């Protein structure tokens, strides 16, 4: 019987063209792009080009693109970085009840730092109702985080609708 892989939120098979593009950096150009020696030159140029390409793709500046080692690291950087940037201005966050620990743990850390965190429930399908998120927003809400696709059951959240409500109240939206 053929098997079907259903955990694409965690990791995916690597496309052949990606393997081909990466092979030179696994074989010949293996230097750390942050190093000062000659082995770092080719990887550093490749990273700069990738940063430019990514920025162009999403309409950002290259300086706004940060590469991290994992989604967990990226979520921590985003959530805790926003909290630090907001300072004392807005110390309330909203997350859904089904967030991955990569989001729920930084939210718990925010609570340890004196933030208030509201956890919005989901329905029987794991869906977050945009109205529930809107109802949880307060004047001091600085950040809302709702995962785009649930890693356990695959529910796709209505992120555009949620983000519109969040932004209309002046808060920032994060999605994993």
Image (cartoon, rainbow, N blue to C red):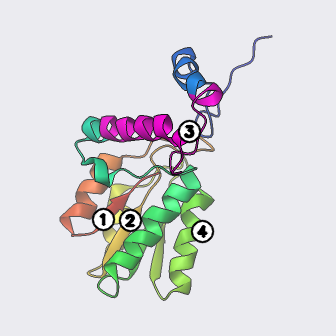
The reply to whether dot 3 and dot 1 touch (C-beta < 8 Å) is: no
Question: Considering only order in the chain, which callout, 4 or 3, is on the residue closer to the N terminus?
Answer: 3
Q: Position of residue 95 (x, y in %)?
A: 46, 65
Q: Nearer the viewer, mark 2 or mark 3?
A: 3
Question: Considering only order in the chain, which callout, 2 or 1, is on the residue closer to the N terminus?
Answer: 2
Q: Which mark is residue 144?
A: 2
Give the residue pinned by disc 4: 105
Q: Foreground: 157 or 170?
A: 170
Give the residue pinned by disc 3: 39
Of all residues, the one furthest to the right in this rendering is 1
Q: Please, what secondary structure does the residue beneath circle 3 have?
A: helix
Give the residue pinned by disc 1: 172
Residue 39 location, quadrant: top right
Mark 3 to mark 1 CA distance (whole Å): 40 Å
Of all residues, the one furthest to the left in this rendering is 168
Mark 2 to mark 3 CA distance (whole Å): 42 Å
Q: Which mark is residue 63?
A: none
Q: Foreground: 59 or 154?
A: 59
The reply to whether dot 4 and dot 2 touch (C-beta < 8 Å) is: no
Q: Is residue 98 visible?
A: no
Q: Is residue 166 visible?
A: yes
Q: Foreground: 102 or 30?
A: 30
Question: Considering only order in the chain, which callout, 1 or 3, is on the residue closer to the N terminus?
Answer: 3
Q: Is residue 153 left or right of residue 75?
A: right
Mark 1 to mark 2 CA distance (whole Å): 6 Å
Mark 3 to mark 4 CA distance (whole Å): 38 Å
Mark 4 to mark 2 CA distance (whole Å): 14 Å
């Amino acid at each position: 019987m053929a098997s079907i892989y259903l955990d694409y939120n965690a990791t995916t098979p690597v496309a052949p063209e990606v393997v081909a593009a990466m092979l030179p950096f696994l074989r010949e150009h293996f230097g750390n792009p942050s190093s000062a020696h000659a082995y770092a030159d080719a990887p550093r140029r490749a990273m700069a080009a990738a940063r430019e390409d990514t920025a162009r793709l999403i309409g950002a500046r290259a300086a706004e693109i940060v590469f991290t080692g994992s989604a967990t690291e990226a979520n921590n950087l985003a959530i805790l970085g926003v909290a630090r940037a907001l300072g004392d201005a807005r110390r309330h966050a909203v997350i859904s009840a089904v967030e991955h620990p990569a989001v729920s743990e930084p939210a718990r850390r925010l609570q340890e730092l004196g933030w208030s965190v509201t956890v919005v429930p989901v329905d029987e399908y794991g869906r977050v109702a945009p109205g529930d998120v809107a109802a949880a927003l307060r004047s001091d809400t600085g950040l809302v985080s709702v995962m785009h696709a649930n890693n356990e059951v695959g529910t796709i959240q209505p992120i555009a609708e949620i983000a519109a409500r969040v932004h209309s109240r002046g808060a920032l939206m994060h999605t994993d």
